[in-house]
Image (cartoon, rainbow, N blue to C red):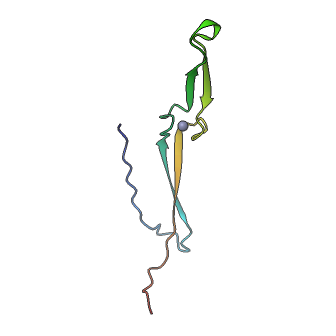
Amino acid sequence: MSDLISLIQITPDPLNWDNAPEVIQVVKKCPACKGVGNFKTAKGYHGSAAGEFIINDCQRCKGAGELKADIIIRWTPNEPITE
Ligand SMILES: [Zn+2]
């Protein structure tokens, strides 16, 4: 199995003065259907159903073939811990 490795550089946006949450989106191939988006199964092996297929959308990616991760980064001041 091979996969593209993604690196995310996490750096605060210099214009985000109110520290609003920042969202990074990463899209990967669906591991359930391997990016196809559906599953094709034979309807039958003999008689009139031979050669016919049933195609069902992948339940995990809903037929898109990809999954998207929303990574939310919330910046806060690094205040010293006092006791
Ligand atoms: Zn899928």
Q: Tell me the quarter of the image containing the C terminus.
A: bottom left
The one nearer the camera, 68 or 75, is 68
The residue at the point 53 percent across, 47 percent down is 68
Q: Residue farthest to the right?
A: 48
**Horizontal and vertical percent position of residue 4:** 37, 43
Instruction: Dividing the image into four quarters, tell me where ligand 1 lies.
Output: top right
Farthest-out residue, front: 46
Q: Left or right: 47 with respect to 80? A: right
Outermost residue on the bottom side: it is: 83
In the rendered image, the vertical position of residue 79 relative to residue 68, given as above or below: below
Q: Determine the image quadrant of residue 59.
A: top right
Determine which quarter of the picture holds residue 2.
top left
- The total of numbered circles placed on residues is 0
Where residue 38 sits in the image (x, y, percent)? 57, 30
Check the picture and name the quadrant holding the N terminus. top left
Above-or-below relation of 50 to 78: above
Q: Is residue 47 above or below residue 25?
A: above
Which residue lies at the image location 50% right of the left edge and 38% below the top edge?
Answer: 32
Nearer to us in this view, 68 or 9: 68
| Residue 69: % across, % down | 52, 51
Left or right: where 13 falls relative to 39: left
